[in-house]
Amino acid sequence: MSKSSKISRRKLLGNLPKGLATLGLGGLFWGSLVKETSAESLVLRPPGALPEKDFLKACLKCGQCVEACPYDTLKLAPAAADNLAGTPYFEPRAIPCYMCTDFPCIKKCPSEALSEKEITIDGEASINNSKMGLAVVHKESCIAYEGIHCSACYRACPLMGEAIQLIFDKNEVTQKHANLKPVVNGDICTGCGLCEHACIMEESAIKVLPPHVIEGKAGTHYIKSWDPADENRLTDIPETKKKEDVESTLDYLNDDNLLDDE
């Protein structure tokens, strides 16, 4: 072995700890960045989970809900997940929520981070009232939207014909056949993920995301005039403009002199 080979080898071994340290720091940085920007906003919780901020405060990270799940759907977030560590979540593509009618995961929760109140409507608790997430169809990759017959997600849905409906329309390619296109009803979808799990695509064309990621929110400047209850959104908004400011603005807009030709 030549002297130059020994030197390069010595340098390589000497620089190895530095490289590993840099790699470790880089991994921690990018890992924390990814967790901060995606994990917290995209994680799917068990049925009956409180809103995320309240859930994180209430969850004891005891794992009892995970043990109670008969389908091994629920998992505990690893230690590397920072403030999500030890909290239950599930991945629909791997194992969806099979919608147990007796919701054992909720009943085992000692802190009410999972609460029957969250799935109770008109005094009756039902797994069908769950809002774990919301399924979204990516039309550009769904083969049903390309004219190929597929109803896998529709047939897998426990609320078939309600949470997912098939819309019939003419196949513009053949001009003879009908397309059966899956459409999700966001008011009924529970986010169980059975549709995502059943999708025949290599990468599922229908995915379940947390409701807050999908749902829009009307601004305070917009009110549904046909829905009197919609005005309730404005009751807790602090007044930001003084009355005289509004009046001066109206006077300016109504000034006829602004319309005079120069």
Image (cartoon, grey):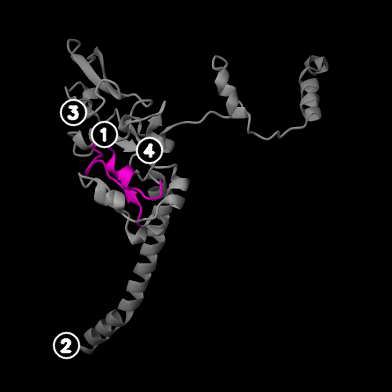
Figure label count: 4
- The reply to whether callout 4 and callout 2 are in contact (CB within 8 Å) is no
Residue 12 in the image: above or below residue 180: below
Q: How crowded is mark 1: few (under 14 residues within 10 Å), some or many (20 or more)?
A: few
Disc 3 marks which amino acid? Ala
Q: Earlier along the polypeptide chain: callout 4 or callout 2? A: 2
Please identify the residue farthest to the front as the structure is shown: 123
Q: Residue drawn at (40%, 59%), measured in percent from left and top?
A: 82
Residue sitting nearer the eye, 44 or 72: 72
Residue sitting nearer the eye, 119 or 139: 119
Residues rendered magenta in the picture: 86-112
Q: Is residue 143 left or right of residue 209?
A: left
Residue 188 in the image: above or below residue 178: below
Residue 132 visible in this rendered orientation of the protein: yes
Of badges 4 and 2, nearer the viewer stands 4
Disc 2 marks which amino acid? Met
Q: Name the residue under label 1.
A: 101
Tell me how far mark 4 sits from mark 2, CA to CA: 73 Å
Whether residue 5 appears in magenta in the rendering, the answer is: no
Q: Is residue 59 left or right of residue 95?
A: right
Q: Name the residue under label 2.
A: 1
Question: Residue 63 sits in which quadrant?
Answer: bottom left
Disc 1 marks which amino acid? Thr
Q: Earlier along the polypeptide chain: callout 1 or callout 2? A: 2
Q: Earlier along the polypeptide chain: callout 1 or callout 3? A: 1
Q: In this view, does 37 lie to the left or right of 96?
A: right
Q: Earlier along the polypeptide chain: callout 4 or callout 3? A: 4
Q: Residue drawn at (30%, 25%), measured in percent from left and top?
A: 163
Disc 4 marks which amino acid? Glu
Q: Mark 4 points at which residue?
A: 116
